[in-house]
Each structure stands twice: as C-alpha cells, then as structure tokens.
Image (cartoon, coloured by chain):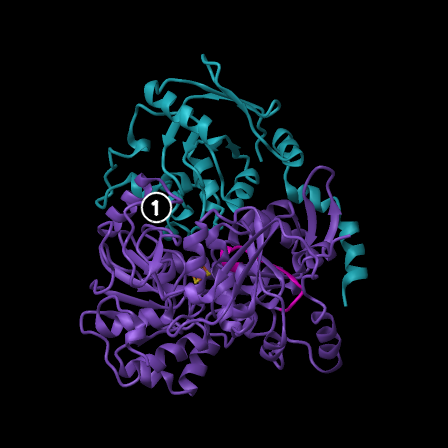
Amino acid sequence: MAGKTLFDKIWDKHVVHEVKNGPQALYIDRHFIHEVTSPQAFNGLRQRGIGVFRPEKTVATADHNVPTENQHLPIKDQLSRHQVNTLIENCKEFGVELYGLGHPYQGIVHVIGPELGITQPGMTIVCGDSHTSTHGAFGNIAFGIGTSEVEQVFATQCILQKKPMKMKIQIDGELKKGVVSKDIILHIISMLTTSGCTGYFVEFMGTTIQGLSMEARMTICNMSIEMGARGGMIAPDETTFEYMKGREFAPKGDAWEKKLAYWKTLKTDEDAVFDKEFYFNAEDIDPMITYGTNPAMGIGITGNVPATFNGSTDQGLKKALQYMDLQGGSQLLGKKIDYVFIGSCTNSRIEDLRLVAELVKGKKKADHVHAMIIPGSRQVELQARAEGLDKILEGAGFELRQPGCSACLGMNEDKVPKGKYCVSTSNRNFEGRQGPGARTMLASPLTAAAAAINGYITDVREMID
Amino acid sequence: MEKFTTLISTCVPVPLQDVDTDQIIPARFLKATTREGFGDNLFCDWRYKEDGQPNEDFVLNDDTYKGQILVAGKNFGCGSSREHAAWAIYDYGFKVVVSSFFADIFKNNALNNGLLPVQVTDVFLDQLFSTIEDDPEAEIRISLEDQEISIIGSNLTENFEINPYKKLCLQKGYDDIDFLLSKIDEIEKYELVEED
Ligand code: SF4
C-alpha cells in the first residue's frame, strides 16, 4: 500500500464520523474567532438555545475592524464599536477567551496564534477567515470557514467537510538577491492562476522551503488560498521546533518532549501519492509585483504588463487594466505611486519589519508617498520598539501604527483614496479592497519599502548590494 | 434553512470571470451583527455610482433582467471566506447561482444557506449567456431532485453534481448543525480517545 501524505495523516486522525456518500465530521483542535464573522454564529447558538461545546478550544481577538491609533479610546465609528463590543459581550456570555483591544496578546488572528504557540503541528485549526491557511506553516491542517461553520464548531467542536484532494508544490534551489518568500508565492500564483488549486490542499516542500524561516513560511501558506487552495502546509522541522520552543502556550517540560517526538513523525511518506504536482525553481523567481485586480495578475518587477492573460478572458484583463489605469505592454518600473502599506497577516511580523528597517535605515521616503506600517500584533509592535526599529522607520518617514488588519481590507479608517496607487504587502488587490477605487499593487516588504523611498516602482536589487 | 425543490425563473447575467467576494459585498458593509439586510449592498461598487445613484450600466439596475437565478462567469465567489456574500445574494432574492466553476468556501457557504450553486460546463454557460442575451424573458428550470438544469423551450439541458448529503439537507431544509448535534455522543467518545 502506498504511504500517506502529511495531510492524510492529520486529516484521518481527526475524522469523528463519516456520512455515507457525504462529508466527514472533522474534529477541530483550535478555533480562532474575530469580531466580523462571529456575531451571527453566536446568534445562531442563542436561537438554538445551546452554548459553546468546548469554549477552551476557541480564542478570540479583535482585528478586522479596529482603529490603528488611539486604541485606548472608545472606537469612533459607531458600527465598528458596536461590532467589537458585541464580541466582548459574546465572549463573556459563552466563556470564550478574548485578547481584545488593549490586551498584550491582541493582534491579527493569524499572527497571534503562531506567536503565542497556540498554533502547533499536527492540529486541525479553523477560523472564519480565509487566510487561516497561514497556520499551515507549522505542519497542521488549517483552513478558513464561513459563519455557519463557525457555528458548527461552537456547537460541536466539529465541522462537516469533504476531504480535499492533495497537491504537492515543490520549490528547489537558492533564491536570488532581493527575492523573499512573498515573491515565491506571488510567482507561483501568477503561474497557477486564482483557481489553479481549487479543491486541493497544498503541501509546499523542497530545499527552498526548508531554508525559509517560520515567518517566511507563513507568508507562503497565507497566500495559498489566493490560488483557490483549501489551505497550504509545510512539514514541521527543526526550524519549526526552534520557533515554538518557550512560546506562551507551547507545551513545556515533559509535555514538550512527548509532543516533540510526535511532531517529528509528521511528514509525507516517501511513497505517498499526490493528486497533482508542480515544480518550481527558485532561480527563476524575480521580485514580483501585481498590475491587475487579482493576485494572479503578477509579473517580475522588470517585466511588462501583459496585453493578454491566460487564466482570464481578455475582457477580464481589459477591465483590470482599466481599473488600474495601466497599459498592456507597459513597464511598471518607474511608475509613480502614492501609498505604501506594510502590514496584514501576510507580511506584518517582526521579520518583515526588520527587513524594511534594514532597507530604509538612514534613508527618507519620497515626499509625496504616504507610508504606513501596521504591526501584526501588540507583541510585534513592542518587539519592534524594543529593537529600536521604530526610530529607524519613523526616521525614514514611515508611520508606525497600532496592530490590526487596517488597509488590508479597509474596514476601518485606513483606506487608500480613489485612483491612488498603493504598493501593499497584503494579499489581495481586488477592486476596492483597500477602499473604493483604490489601486493596489501587491509586493514583498522589500519592494514596498523601495517604492516608498523612491516614490515610484523600483527594482529593490538596485538598492542592495 | 428554507427547502429547495424545483425552480423556474428568468435569469440575471453577470458575464464576468473571477467575481470575488469583495465585489459581491465590499468589506465596509461587514460591520453588521445580524444576517439580514445585506441584499441592499449586493455588488454595491458596481451597482451604485460614487454619489449613491444607481449605475444604469450594471445589470441589477437594468429592468430587462429579473429573476431568482444569477448566472455568472467562471470561478465565482473567489477571495474571502465571508459568508456575507452568500447572505447578500440570497437576501437580494436569488435562490440559485449558475457558473462553470465556484470557489470552495463560497460553495459551502451557499449550500449552508439554502442558496444552490449549479455548476455547468463552459459550453452550457456560454449557451446560457447567449440565450439570455437574445431573450431576457427566457426561463430556466432547475430541478434539485433530478440534478438537472434546462433552458425551457429549447433542448438545452445539463445535469449538475451535488453531494447526496447536501442535496438531502436542501430538500429537507435542515442543516449541518442539526446533524452534528445528533452525533455529540460520538464526538465525546472521540475526545476520550484522542485527547492528551
Ligand atoms: S490582515 Fe487582511 S487578509 Fe489578514 S485576516 Fe486581516 S483582513 Fe484578512
């Protein structure tokens, strides 16, 4: 019999019940919630007259809809305030732990789970947010769910799911100068399109992946959803264990040793079979940037905006270029930009802030550019200050704000005005994502920082030696 | 959840690919704490101009097209997991979305809310779009029992896939939570064995 993939091993271990000709009931080890996709689920429980079945397995934070300044004051926007207060009340009523505004653990849900050691190898993890795939970097099965499914997990700690197919994406070789994990995933998405992995769960492997830090791995798994995948994962290794050791909620002492022994078994067997495989070469990857209105519309920084697009109709490309006010065949290099947003669950971790700080140290952003940095969590913010990154960043004219999703989805005040170009380290460049009419170009923290300094799209390789 | 059996209706066409959930319902409308009322903001940024006036070019403001079936291009519902997208479509009055491909989470969300995603072939979808363009009054019949979509008055018909369990849920109007709650004993047993 053929061996099992890592995905199979974890999935199969969590199946509680199988519906004949139907989905499987999967047991969920950790459930994260936030203010936007949980209120209707709590309401559902009330209507059914039931409580949260295993409240200790759910952790809440406020991130999507929070202001990124003056977090100690009441939220100004009435609807946002109501939504955040509803979360506080719901958590109290149903006995769920909340790391809300002002809490030292508050932050973007996909940043705090890993940094607190709540996210662990071998687990099943869900959250009412598509970028839950981020947690898969630790070798677990993590995926986004809808609000009805949030209610399922509340009510039963299980979720009914059809088992996805398995895909392997292997990347080997050494990254070129100025190329980071964000470029890897933008490159892959541009090749596989936004629906190229729909129905699949992806395992990333290969020497390039093995060489990445946990932060960098999270960036890759984070964006696996942008090619339609149910989620992405990376087998745990020494880098994973090193990162986890001593974290707040990571096991300690004997419990650590016991878990560690188990975690070390978590890998795909040599003879396991995937339903689909793709191979990439790290040397082929340049710093990437998107020109269009979905994350697959990306090119190498020195490339030309295409005049035709494989995954989409010409009509789609035409509409995208019209929205972005760009010409097919033109270059993006040198294009003047207005905003730079460094943040979101894709690139707001301490490593991202360090990368940016290193690049902008002693330099100044261009006068016309608004550059903001939104740390992923309170802990990241404090760490950045402790390392003196705040001085460097502020010295370069970047505004360092308080943690939250911010301009990644523009639910709070942090929006990009209509028609303005924003180089963003987030994960989505959909029409209006950063505010109605905003024009988003996705890139790595390095490429974003370089654009902030020069005031136009820049090949970051020219700025480093 | 409401039951679904058979539907006969005219269609509203949105012939675009990769319609993402940020277009279906922009994030700034996600501040509500209940499920109701999202239909008013369905496709908001395409539907209304900046001054709040209806954009006549968009199909929802075009009286020619009405009905309970939304027909959209390939890869419908990609992007965020927001169930608000399914709520908005349903709240607006659609009962079915037809496309040649659906994003995973959207499909689940739709099914969990009594909104039927009907996946057809690219060829059928093209035929459907051109039929609607030629005759906006053309009616479509969708039978969940037979898993069949047909263009009435033509011989164009196609079968669609749906998981037997999900089909039953829709037909009976019951949901996953009812089902899982009936398995609580099994879940507790699992916890005893698997938990450390
Ligand atoms: S940072 Fe953006 S993508 Fe990440 S959870 Fe928040 S809104 Fe979603």
Percent x, y of residue B66: 37, 25
For label 1, the residue is A309
Residue A89 visible here: no
In front of the other: A361 or A48: A361
In the rendered image of the structure, the colour used to display chain B is cyan
Task: Identify the residue at image location x=33%, y=32%.
Answer: B60
Percent x, y of residue A71: 39, 72
- Where does the C terminus of chain A fall, quadrant-wise? bottom left
The quarter of the displayed image where residue A257 is located: bottom right
Dot 1: what SS? loop
The quarter of the displayed image where residue A382 is located: bottom left
In front of the other: A338 or A43: A338
Task: Identify the residue at image location x=42%, y=63%.
Answer: A284
Residue A168 visible here: yes
Q: Is residue A129 highlighted in magenta?
A: yes
Placement of A75 over or under A399, stated as above or below: above
Task: State the residue lying farthest toward the left.
Answer: A367
Instruction: Please give left or right for residue A365 compared with residue A98 in the image.
Output: left
**Which chain does the numbered disc 1 sit on?**
A
Task: State the residue lying farthest toward the top.
Answer: B153
Counting other residues with Cα less than 10 Å from the Cα at mark 1, is it few (<14), some (14-19), or many (20 or more)? some
Instruction: Please give left or right for residue A358 compared with residue A274 in the image.
Output: left
Instruction: Please give left or right for residue A354 compared with residue A98 in the image.
Output: left
In the rendered image of the structure, the colour used to display chain A is purple
Placement of A183 over or under B163, stated as above or below: below
Q: What is the span of residues highlighted in magenta in the rendered image?
A: A120-132
Percent x, y of residue A170: 55, 61
Q: Is residue B1 highlighted in magenta?
A: no
Amino acid at the residue labelled 1: Phe
Task: Identify the residue at image location x=42%, y=74%.
Answer: A352
